[in-house]
Image (cartoon, rainbow, N blue to C red):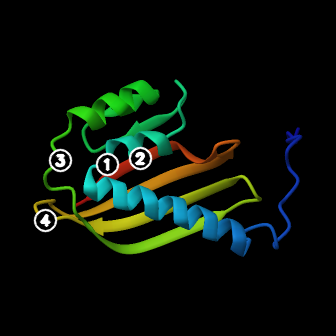
């Protein structure tokens, strides 16, 4: 028997990568990038969903919940955060869901870094609900 999914409707092509939505997510993502390099913890914390279900898998840590993510940011040394983005992909799916992906290089990092983020539009704006950072050696 073939199982069917009640959510099997597909998005119309004009709702994927709607220019206005991609522009909004890109602006939020660039705000995150700027805050990351400047170690602006307040902005970084504000861009993650303030919820115990938010998560961030880093290069050496698995953080579950906004409180754990904020504690990590507060304890991390502010040096060596600059990076060069080599490739960036922003994709929106409808008006309220998007993903961002980058490849980057950082001085002292052995290999090419990769970052994926899942963004959701809430009443207070775009927030990261899940993130993953890794290195391809």
Q: Residues within 10 Å of mark 2 (few under 14, many from 20)?
A: some
**Tag 2, which secondary structure?**
helix
Q: Residues within 10 Å of mark 3 (few under 14, many from 20)?
A: some
The earlier-in-sequence mark between 4 and 3 is: 3
Is there a contact, CB below 8 Å, between mark 3 and mark 1? no
Instruction: Give how far across and how far down residue 107 sits, in percent.
Output: 13, 65
Q: Is residue 36 left or right of residue 117?
A: left
Q: Is residue 55 left or right of residue 13?
A: left
Identify which residue is drawn at 49% across, 60% down. 29
Q: Dot 2 corresponds to which residue?
A: 43
Identify which residue is drawn at 53% across, 59% down. 28
The earlier-in-sequence mark between 4 and 1 is: 1
Q: How many discs mark residues in the rendered view?
A: 4
Q: CA distance from mark 2 to mark 3?
A: 14 Å
Instruction: Give how far across and how far down residue 42 sits, in percent.
Output: 38, 41
Q: Give the mark toward the camera: 4 or 3.
A: 3
Is there a contact, CB below 8 Å, between mark 4 and mark 3? no
Q: CA distance from mark 4 to mark 1?
A: 20 Å
The earlier-in-sequence mark between 3 and 1 is: 1
Q: Give the mark toward the camera: 2 or 4.
A: 2
Q: Dot 3 corresponds to which residue?
A: 78
- The foreground one among 89 and 35 is 35
Q: Dot 4 corresponds to which residue?
A: 107
Q: Dot 1 corresponds to which residue?
A: 40
Q: Residues within 10 Å of mark 1 (few under 14, many from 20)?
A: some
Is there a contact, CB below 8 Å, between mark 2 and mark 1? yes
**Tag 3, which secondary structure?**
loop
Q: Give the mark toward the camera: 3 or 1.
A: 1
> Where's the C terminus, which quadrant?
bottom left
Q: Is residue 86 left or right of residue 30?
A: left
Instruction: Give how far across and how far down residue 26 sits, in percent.
Output: 54, 67
């Amino acid at each position: 028997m073939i199982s069917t999914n009640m959510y099997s409707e597909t998005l119309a092509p004009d709702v994927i990568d709607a220019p206005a939505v991609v522009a909004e997510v890109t602006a939020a993502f660039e705000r995150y990038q700027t805050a990351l390099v400047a170690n602006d913890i307040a902005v970084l914390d504000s861009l993650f969903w303030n919820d115990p279900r938010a998560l961030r898998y880093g290069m050496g840590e698995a953080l579950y919940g906004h409180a754990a993510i904020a504690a990590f940011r507060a304890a991390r040394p502010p040096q060596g955060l600059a990076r060069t983005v080599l490739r960036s992909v922003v994709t929106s799916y409808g008006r309220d869901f998007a993903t961002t992906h980058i490849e980057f290089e950082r001085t002292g990092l052995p290999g090419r870094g990769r970052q994926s983020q899942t963004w959701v539009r809430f009443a207070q704006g775009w927030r990261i609900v899940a993130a993953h950072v890794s290195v391809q050696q």
